Image (cartoon, rainbow, N blue to C red):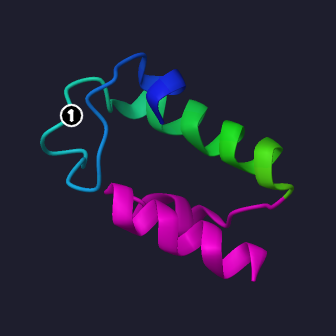
Amino acid sequence: MRSVFQTDDIDETCSQRNCEKWDSMNHLNLIVELEMEFGVSFEPEEIAQMRSFDEVVQFVKSKTA
């Protein structure tokens, strides 16, 4: 997330609401990076639900478990 959003201000409280760099384009960039890094694929419904750091972590964990 830090590399996609180009900021060090990423922690477990980060969400679309409080991270100004988390716009629609960077959201898609994040999904692409996650899919490539972890060798997973996300459904459109899952992508729409990834609105916070914790949600991203949970979806990645569910795909890699």
Residue interval drawn in magenta = 40-65
The residue under label 1 is which amino acid type? Cys
Residue 39 lies, in percent from the top left, at: 86, 55
Spot occupied by residue 50 in the image (x, y as percentages of width and height)? 42, 60
Identified at 60% across, 62% down, the residue is 44
- How many marks can you see? 1
Residue under the image location 29 percent in, 46 percent down = 11
Q: Quadrant of the C terminus?
A: bottom right
Magenta stretch contains residue 59: yes
Give yes or no for residue 28 being in the magenta stretch.
no
In this rendered view, identify the residue nearer to me: 24 or 17: 17
Q: Is residue 44 left or right of residue 40?
A: left
10 vs 47: above or below: above
Q: Can you name the residue that lies furthest to the top here?
A: 6
Q: Is residue 57 left or right of residue 36?
A: left
Residue at mark 1: 19
Q: Main secondary structure of the magenta part?
A: helix
64 on left or right of 31: right
Crowd rating for badge 1 (residues with CA inside 10 Å; few <14, some 14–19, many 20+) = some
Residue 10, percent across and down? 31, 37
Classify 57 as above or below 28.
below
Answer with the quarter of the image where residue 9 lies.
top left
